Image (cartoon, rainbow, N blue to C red):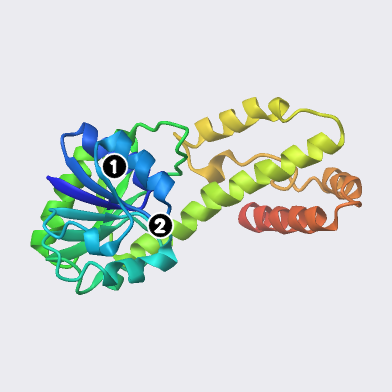
Amino acid sequence: MNIVCIGSGNVATHLAIALKAMGAEIVQVWSQDSRNAEILAALTKAKPVLDWQEIDRSADLYLIAVKDDAIPAVASHLKGVKGIVVHTAGATDMNVLQGAGSGYGVLYPLQTFSKTKSIDLTHVPFCIEADRPGTLEKIAAVAHLLSQQVAELSSEQRKILHVAAVFACNFTNHLYHLSSQLLEQHQLKFDLLKPLITETAQKIQNALPSDVQTGPAVRDDQETMKSHLELLEGSPELQQLYETLSNSIKKTHLL
C-alpha cells in the first residue's frame, strides 16, 4: 500500500511511523512546515513535499492529519486523486471530504499523542467511517493493521465521543495543571499527587466512575468544602470551579 501523509504533527508522526512498520510505503509527507516534513519523511523514508503540485496522485491512501479547520482546504487539493482520502479528526464531519479521491472516510485514533512519547497503537481504539461499503472495507483493513480495537461510528457518534474525550482527558489534564500550580504556590510538589492519580485511573478500568467516586462532595461534607473554599479565597476562579464541580458531584450522588 502506497500512502501520502498530509501533515507532520503528533498524529501524523505516530500513524505514519506505525504504518511504515506494518509494511506500508509512505511515499510522501506534505506539510506547511518544511522542517517537520523533512523530519517525518526521513523517519519513514518518504519524500518531503511542500507544493500541492508535487503530490503523487496515484497513491492508494491519502492520510490527512492536520488541524480540523484546515481539513476542507486540504481536501480541495485532493480532488481527482486515485486513492482513498481519510481524515483523522474526532469532531469533523466525514462529508468535508466529499469529492476527494476515489472514496473517502475517517480513521480516527482515540488517544492523546506527543511526538516524544511512543504509544502502543494496538490498544488504541480506531473509529472508522466511509462513504460506501467498499471504501469502509479498505479503511477497516488499514485500521486493523494498527489496532485490535476498531469500531464503525457515524460522524455524529464520533463527535459525541470526542466531546466525552475532552472531558475525560483535556479537562482532567487541565485540572492536574491547576493542582500543580496550587501546590507550587505553597512549596509542595506535584509528585505527592501522582499515586492518587494512578489509583483513580486504575479503579475505573474495572468499575464505573460513579461507583468509585470519593471526596467531600459525594459525602456532602459541608465543613470540609467550606474550609477548602476559604483556602481558595485568593483564587476566585478556582473557588468557582470547585463549587461547580462539587455541585455536579452532589447532584449525581445525593439526589
- Point out residue 232 in the picture as x, y percentages from the top left corner: 87, 48
Type of residue at label 1?
Answer: Ala
Between the C-alphas of marks 1 and 2, the distance is 17 Å
Tell whether 104 sits left or right of 232.
left
Dot 1: what SS? helix
Query: Of the residues shown, which amino acid type is indicated by label 2?
Result: Gln
- Residue displayed at 46% across by 32% down: 117
* Picture disc at residue 199: none
- Reply above or below: 76 against 135: below
Q: Is residue 219 left or right of residue 44?
A: right
Q: Is residue 80 above or below residue 190?
A: below
Q: Which mark is residue 16?
A: 1
- The answer to whether residue 129 shows anywhere in this view is no
Q: Does residue 12 appear anywhere in the picture? A: yes
Residue bearing mark 2: 32
Residue 149 lies, with reference to residue 108, above or below; the image says above
Kindly state the secondary structure of the residue where label 2 is placed: loop
Residue at the image position 68 percent from the left and 43 percent from the top: 177
Relative image position of residue 11 (x, y in whole percent): 38, 46
Label 2 crowding class (10 Å Cα cut-off): few <14, some 14-19, many 20+? few
- Does residue 77 sit above or below 241 in this rendering? below
Q: Position of residue 234 (x, y in %)?
A: 91, 51
Q: Nearer the viewer, residue 133 or 24?
A: 24
Q: Residue at x 17, y 41 (%)?
A: 25
Question: Dot 1, how many residues are within 10 Å of its Cα: few (below 14), some (14-19), or many (20+)?
Answer: many
- Tell me the quarter of the picture where residue 61 sits: bottom left
The part of the image, by quadrant, that contains residue 40 is top left
Counting residues from the start of the chain, the first of labels 1 and 2 encountered is 1
